[in-house]
Amino acid sequence: MAHPEFVGLVNSLQATAEAALGDLNAASASAARDGLLAENRARQTAERSLKLLTMLAEKTRGNLDFTEADLLTQAIGSLRERLSASGN
């Protein structure tokens, strides 16, 4: 069974990155308030979240149940796709 705190961590990192990339979600207001959506910081914020998720995947490899591993893999894939589509 997926650990609720792990799921929350992955969802939080993904939501922060998506908010930085322009998605409107619950994290958008908080990210804007914290200055993370300024044009010059938005991509950097999204890339940092992706790096954290990638590091988390590397450090937990072999220790996650299927649901957790799938959630993490999908979050990483989605953010990589979004970042490559947005340039650079």
Image (cartoon, rainbow, N blue to C red):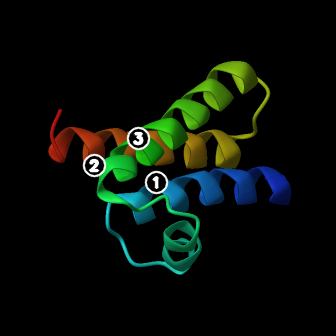
Report, in whole angstroms, how far the alpha carbon at label 1 lies from the one at label 3: 9 Å
Q: Is residue 74 visible?
A: no
| Residue at screen point 41% across, 62% down | 37
**Residue on which the image places disc 1:** 17
Q: Which mark is residue 44?
A: 3
The percent coordinates of residue 74 (x first, y second) are 47, 46
Three-letter code, disc 2: Arg
Labels 3 and 2 touching (C-beta < 8 A): no
Which one is earlier in the sequence, the residue at label 1 or at label 3?
A: 1
Labels 2 and 1 touching (C-beta < 8 A): yes
Label 2 secondary element: helix
Three-letter code, disc 3: Gln
Label 1 secondary element: helix
Q: Nearer the viewer, residue 67 or 78?
A: 78
Tell me the crowding category of disc 2: few under 14, some 14 to 19, or many 20 or more residues within 10 angstroms, Cα based: some
Report, in whole angstroms, how far the alpha carbon at label 2 lies from the one at label 1: 10 Å
Report, in whole angstroms, how far the alpha carbon at label 3 lies from the one at label 2: 13 Å
The percent coordinates of residue 80 (x first, y second) are 34, 38
Which one is earlier in the sequence, the residue at label 3 or at label 2?
A: 3
| Residue at screen point 49% across, 48% down | 75
| Residue at screen point 64% across, 20% down | 58
Which one is earlier in the sequence, the residue at label 2 or at label 1?
A: 1
The percent coordinates of residue 19 (x first, y second) are 43, 65
Q: Nearer the viewer, mark 2 or mark 1?
A: 1
**Residue on which the image places disc 2:** 82
The percent coordinates of residue 16 (x first, y second) are 53, 59
**In what quadrant of the picture does the C terminus appear?**
top left
